[in-house]
Amino acid sequence: MLSTPYEIQFGVKLIIMDKLLGSKKTIAIFVLPGVIFFTLMIFIPIIASVAFSFFEWDGIGKMQFIGFQNFRSLLQDNIDNYWISVKNTVIMALLTAGVQLPLAFILAVVLSEGIKGEGFFRTVYFTPVVVSSSVIGLLFLKIYNPDYGILNVILKHLGLESLTTAWLGNPKTALAALFFPIVWQYIGYHMLLLYAGIKSISPEIFESAKIDGAKLSTIVRKITLPMIAPMIEVCLTLGIIGSIKIFDLSIILTNNGEPLGATLVQAGLMYKQIFQYGMYGLGSATSILIIIQCLLVTVILQRIFKNTRI
Amino acid sequence: MLKKALIVFKYAVLSLIALIQIYPFIWMLLFSLKDNNEIFSGNVMGFPREIHWENYSFALQDGNTMKYFLNSVIVCSASIVLSLLISLMVAYAVSRMRWKYGKQLLTFFLLGIMIPGQAIILPIYITIHMIKIYNTLFSLILVYTAICLPTSIFVLSAYMQNLPRELEESSALDGANIYRIFFGIIVPVIKPAIATVVIFSFLTVWNEFMFAYILIGDSNLMTITVGLFAMQGKYFTNWGPIGAALVIASFPTIAIYLAINKNIQKSLIIGAVKG
């Protein structure tokens, strides 16, 4: 059968493209550096962490297989005050969901209405997000300074001298003092994500609701919230996983758990177990519990938000 | 009347929050220019009576901030370039090349986005000791490159998927080989996605603390995040120089942010949603 010139050209094109984009050798060249890197630096270490968690090991001597004993020590025997670190994680997660996100949402709604100076406020609110947690930590160390920190100085100016305290040294205030900078720093991030979500809703929907005489509270409840549910899921996931992973500020602000273990967090506990107590197996078990929580949170939130997807 | 009052109230609240978000940085700038005498004698919040620039030279030299800064620049640029190159190639293979396992490979990499650094820190620490690169910038470069890969691959491949097929075809028919097509046509076309990835990686790496804290013990090799912490430990009663070091450390991110804040906001939205 004779082919038309067009068909021949088309066939040639297919062959050339197939050869170009289907060659096993080229694919290997493109993929291998990434695969090797990722396998060596991420994949195998994860497997290794899981494996370590079933052993008793000090990093030097012999490894002894002890099954789930490390997990039992943590979860049942509350070794190294594991449950205090979990309690602190839960408090931070609740702060994220109950304080940080609602505030961010209100800011996002107000700014998305297109008020004057919208860009300015957005830029300012977001600025702390780009600064490293170590700068934030050291800055708050100064802010909380009992004698010359602005917090106590402002309180004194307001005549509230009785409220001044050594914020990070006082076991009653240390946890709040540790968590406040985190809430403060990432409000702008959540605001921006929710703002982007709201802006992606077509303005006509809002307009027609307004024409129908809907109140702002109704609009927020019936339109805004359901429409940005996926973004809320992203924020909750990021915020709660962030709470589980807290490490930097705990090291910088409260010397990893001080005073008296009141501000202990899970990643900080893992650090102590591995690098201070030399308990590699136990520390790995703590890190595996951290991963499990992160995955659980992601999956549970996906389930919860499944029905809200349009 | 009521409406006007409401608007005033709205702006008052917005401005108050803006003040809370930005004042700590202004305060940092102010005390970086003061000496201890001034702070201890009661001028905690006001403008410096006398400007003490020498705090900055003290922070840069005696406080080692210059060294930390350069270490961060080296680690950052190397891991950004390396992770960008690797992820561009992987993204191209999974999104445009013709083979069966592209999707699966992408899923494999995406696992990395969900995994917290704590999950890999001990094995990495042990390996790095074993291959004798503990206390080197190289060890950090390896780790940071790996950390940046998953998000970069995801963003880049999502972007590449939407490019038209004809893009490669015309030059393929002209006889260009795959590398010419990749570097000459694809890479230039996806510049916006590359910008997003570079910004995201830069912020991740420049601000990273945990790995830098655990993998570097030598104070000559510390990156800025850990170096500042070390400096604070040494000079904690010396307010001015510490303030100066904090200003120096946050300057690049804040300056870049203010210069291209639309892009950065976009990058972080994409990074979060994809991640």
Image (cartoon, coloured by chain):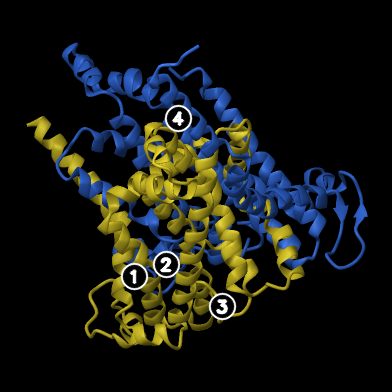
Of residues A46 and A272, which is closer to you in this image? Answer: A46
Marks 2 and 3, how far apart in space? 23 Å
Confirm or deny contact between disc 4 and disc 2 (CB under 8 A).
Answer: no
Residue to which mark 2 is pinned: A139
Labelled disc at residue A87: none
Chain for disc number 2: A
Residue to which mark 3 is pinned: B221
Observer-side mark, 4 or 2, equals 4
Q: Is residue A232 left or right of residue A76?
A: left
From this view, report whether residue B99 is shown above or below residue B171.
Answer: above
Confirm or deny contact between disc 2 and disc 3 (CB under 8 A).
Answer: no
Say which colour chain B has. Answer: yellow
Amino acid type of the residue that numbered disc 2 sits on in the rendered structure: Leu
Element class at badge 3: loop
Q: Neighbour class for label 4 at 10 Å: few (<14), some, many (≥20)?
A: some
Which chain does the blue colour mark? A
From this view, report whether residue B106 is shown above or below residue B220.
Answer: above
